[in-house]
């Protein structure tokens, strides 16, 4: 058995803002590549037995980030598309773990497109700091997404099918 390296990712890890298409494209990508699918937001809800928004409301921003770090850092997966919560990039420990187990793909979507896609911010489980706007959150996270990205793919002006096709092509080129 060969050891994995950057050209042979065990997993595909999707990062990006809420509304960037991580979960939706992740499911379709997993189907098209014959991989499993894991959504870290759903994993957190299952393990904590609570909705993300309730966790954010109860624990606050930093408490939620600690919970997310703990759960994401324990993921043991292979041959899987992993869709992460948008806030995972606040944890160096979680991101280091994700980089060890897969290739990080940043779905880069402009702020106006994010605003168009997100219908109700109050129910999305978005970890906002007190009195923080979505635009400020976007500006704060952008350099973190860019820092951790192994591959960056623009999600603007693309259908989910076009996005999935582009991700799949980039992954195939890496493993060829």
Image (cartoon, rainbow, N blue to C red):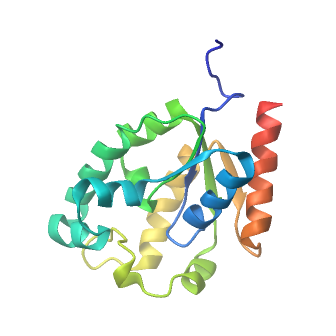
* In the foreground, 169 or 136: 169
The residue shown at (80%, 66%) is 162
**The N terminus - image quarter:** top right
Is 101 above or below relative to 68? above
Query: Is residue 174 shown left or right of residue 24?
Result: right
Query: Is residue 88 shown left or right of residue 99?
Result: left
Is 176 above or below relative to 50? above
The residue shown at (66%, 28%) is 6
The residue shown at (82%, 38%) is 173
Which image quadrant for residue 175?
Answer: top right
Q: Position of residue 130 (x, y in %)?
A: 24, 75
| Furthest-left residue in this view | 58
Question: Total of numbered circles in the picture?
Answer: 0
Q: Position of residue 129 (x, y in %)?
A: 28, 70
The residue shown at (76%, 76%) is 157
| Furthest-top residue in this view | 1
Is 13 above or below relative to 96? below
Q: Position of residue 29 (x, y in %)?
A: 68, 55
* In the foreground, 107 or 4: 4
Which image quadrant for residue 48?
Answer: bottom left
**The C terminus - image quarter:** top right
């Amino acid at each position: 058995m060969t050891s994995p390296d950057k050209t042979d990712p065990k997993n595909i890890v999707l990062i990006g803002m809420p509304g960037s298409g991580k979960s939706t494209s992740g499911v379709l990508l997993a189907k098209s590549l014959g991989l499993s699918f894991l959504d870290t937001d759903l994993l957190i809800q299952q393990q904590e037995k609570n909705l993300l928004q309730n966790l954010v409301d109860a624990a606050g921003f930093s408490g939620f980030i600690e919970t997310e770090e703990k759960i994401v850092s324990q993921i043991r997966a292979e041959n899987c598309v992993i869709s992460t919560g948008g806030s995972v990039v606040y944890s160096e420990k979680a991101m280091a773990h994700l980089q060890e187990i897969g290739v990080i793909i940043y779905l880069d979507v402009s702020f106006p497109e994010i605003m168009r896609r997100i219908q109700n911010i109050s129910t999305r489980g978005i970890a906002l700091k007190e009195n923080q706007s979505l635009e400020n959150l976007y500006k704060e996270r952008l350099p973190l997404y860019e820092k951790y990205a192994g591959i960056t793919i623009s999600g603007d002006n693309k259908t989910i099918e076009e996005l999935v096709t582009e991700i799949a092509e980039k992954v195939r080129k890496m493993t060829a």
